[in-house]
Amino acid sequence: MATATAISFPPSTPSSDSCDLTDQIRQRALARLYERRAAVDELIDSLEMYQARQHQVRAECVAISATAKKLTAAAK
């Protein structure tokens, strides 16, 4: 009966355990990298939208300033 148990459950070798552990560590590290990459992509998108809004606001301010200057010059 001891032989049947040995055959059905072969002992694990230290090298396979260390390979499994290394694979798990690498998989967790890769998952963290993908999470960080997604966070960085989201941050970049937010910054690009902010810059676009700031550019639009500045353009509106320039247009208002130009109109105000024209009205002031015409009033003189």
Image (spheres, rainbow, N blue to C red):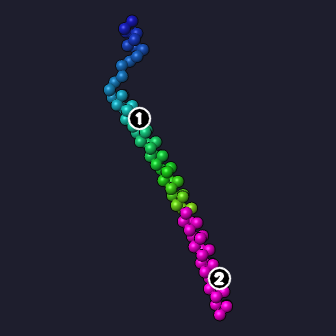
Answer whether residue 64 is magenta in the image. yes
Q: Residues within 10 Å of mark 2 (few under 14, many from 20)?
A: few
Q: Amino acid at mark 2?
A: Thr
Spatial separation of the CA atoms under disc 1 and disc 2: 65 Å
Q: Residue furthest left?
A: 14
Q: Residue furthest bottom?
A: 76
Answer whether residue 20 is magenta in the image. no
Residue 16, quarter of picture: top left
Q: Amino acid at mark 1?
A: Gln
Q: Residues within 10 Å of mark 1 (few under 14, many from 20)?
A: few
Left/right placement of residue 13 relative to residue 71 reads left
Q: Secondary structure at mark 2?
A: helix
Name the residue located 37 percent from the left edge and 35 percent from the top edge: 22
Specify the quadrant that holds the N terminus: top left
The residue pinned by badge 2 equals: 67
The residue pinned by badge 1 equals: 24
Start and end of the magenta stretch? 50-76
